[in-house]
């Protein structure tokens, strides 16, 4: 089952010919979550042959133009395409007023319903969940209320080993209990421990999105052991004063967060146009955290499935 992130935009506030403003698409088992929606997001979705019509949830980190200007065009295109399914938008409450004003002029007869879910950027709170995944906000420190998002798969049950079903004649009524960790007693009274009956479950995968912010070490507990961490790195450390002044992070700070969070992989982006290459960002970050990658528009990063390791492995 896929757990993959496609970068739609990796620039900071000013787009370039190679980098669009911020937007990402996360695919979790064919559930598509759009994270921020900078100018040109719908163009990138088309360019990279992604299924825009499957997007039912849009998460907006904050109300700066390079993170929301693409939303209005995307909604318009959804309407022209005859979309009928609800569109759920999660953002700071002021965006609801902006959307209503826009739709008063350009979208009075949308063929679908927009459900606006207000979020409070200053709190870490569960804002979405279904049977497979949960989404929690991560408070950030920027010039306006801003939050990141943590996507976590839910823990799956263990799988019963096929060979034991017949060997111990396990009835159907006992199988869920065994998957949940229970032992089994045979008709002869022999107690079979769960570890001999089941295979370890698939490890839940996770993705954390940390956009425009000063480095916040208080978020490290929220990010512990995340599989994939995106952390903005607008500036190099030589411009750390400017980063602090504009409420952004450096590549060194992003790498420090990844190291202290024990992340498996770090993605950095949101690069200022003052820099001509992302290579210095990678070099600066990799000096602290080796598994660092500078994102490019159109790149896809996947987290593969793996089983939880046990003493029996």
Image (spheres, rainbow, N blue to C red):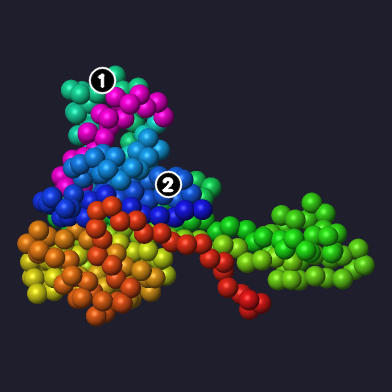
Q: Is residue 27 left or right of residue 18?
A: right
Q: Secondary structure at mark 1?
A: loop
Residue that label 2 marks: 128
Q: Secondary structure at mark 2?
A: strand
**Can residue 60 be seen at all in this image of the molecule?**
no
**Can residue 3 be seen at all in this image of the molecule?**
yes
Badge 2 crowding class, 10 Å Cα cut-off, few under 14, some 14 to 19, many 20 or more, is some
Please state, as top left, top right, bottom left or bottom right, where the C terminus lies in the image.
bottom right
Q: Is residue 89 left or right of residue 10?
A: right
Badge 1 crowding class, 10 Å Cα cut-off, few under 14, some 14 to 19, many 20 or more, is few
Residue 10 to residue 59: above or below? below
Spatial CA span between label 1 and label 2: 28 Å
Q: Residue at x 84, y 63 (%)?
A: 168
Q: Residue at x 35, y 38 (%)?
A: 52
Query: Which image quadrant is residue 81 in?
Result: top left
Give the residues drawn in magenta, as a range: 64-85
Mark 1 or 2, closer to the camera:
1
Position of residue 290 measured from the top left corner of the image (x, y, whole percent): 31, 77
Residue that label 1 marks: 108
Towards the viewer: 53 or 49:
49
Label 2 near label 1: C-beta < 8 Å?
no
Q: Residue at x 24, y 65 (%)?
A: 294
Residue 69 to residue 206: above or below? above
Q: Residue at x 37, y 40 (%)?
A: 51
Please say whether residue 65 is one of the residues in the magenta stretch: yes
Residue 137 to residue 237: above or below? above
Please say whether residue 18 is one of the residues in the magenta stretch: no
Residue 8 to residue 142: above or below? above
Question: Taken as a whole, is the magenta stretch helix, strand or loop?
Answer: helix
Q: Is residue 138 left or right of residue 65?
A: right
Instruction: Name the mark on residue 89.
Output: none
């Amino acid at each position: 089952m896929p757990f993959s992130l496609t970068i739609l935009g990796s620039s900071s506030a000013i787009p370039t010919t190679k980098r669009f403003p911020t937007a990402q698409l996360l695919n979790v088992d064919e559930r598509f979550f759009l994270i921020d929606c900078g100018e040109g997001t719908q163009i990138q979705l088309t360019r990279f042959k992604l299924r825009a019509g499957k997007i039912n949830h849009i998460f907006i980190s904050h109300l700066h133009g390079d993170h929301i200007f693409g939303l209005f065009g995307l909604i318009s295109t959804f309407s022209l395409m005859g979309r009928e399914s609800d569109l759920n938008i999660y953002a700071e409450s002021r965006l609801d007023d902006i959307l209503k004003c826009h739709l008063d002029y350009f979208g009075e007869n949308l063929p679908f319903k927009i459900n606006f879910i207000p979020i409070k950027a200053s709190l870490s709170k569960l804002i979405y969940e279904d049977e497979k995944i949960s989404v929690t906000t991560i408070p950030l420190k920027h010039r306006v209320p801003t939050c990141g998002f943590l996507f976590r798969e839910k823990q799956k049950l263990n799988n019963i080993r096929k060979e034991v079903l017949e060997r111990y004649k396990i009835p159907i009524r006992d199988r869920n209990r065994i998957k949940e960790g229970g032992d089994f007693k045979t008709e002869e009274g022999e107690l079979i421990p769960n570890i001999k009956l089941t295979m370890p479950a698939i490890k839940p995968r996770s993705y954390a999105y940390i956009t425009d912010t000063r480095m916040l070490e208080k978020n490290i507990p929220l990010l512990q052991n995340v599989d994939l961490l995106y952390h903005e790195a607008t500036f190099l450390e030589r411009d750390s004063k400017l980063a602090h002044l504009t409420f952004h992070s450096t590549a060194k700070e992003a790498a420090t967060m990844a190291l202290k969070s024990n992340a498996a992989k770090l993605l950095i982006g949101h690069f200022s146009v003052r820099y001509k290459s992302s290579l210095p960002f990678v070099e600066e970050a990799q000096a602290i955290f080796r598994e660092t990658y500078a994102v490019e528009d159109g790149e896809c990063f996947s987290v593969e499935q793996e089983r939880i390791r046990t003493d029996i492995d």
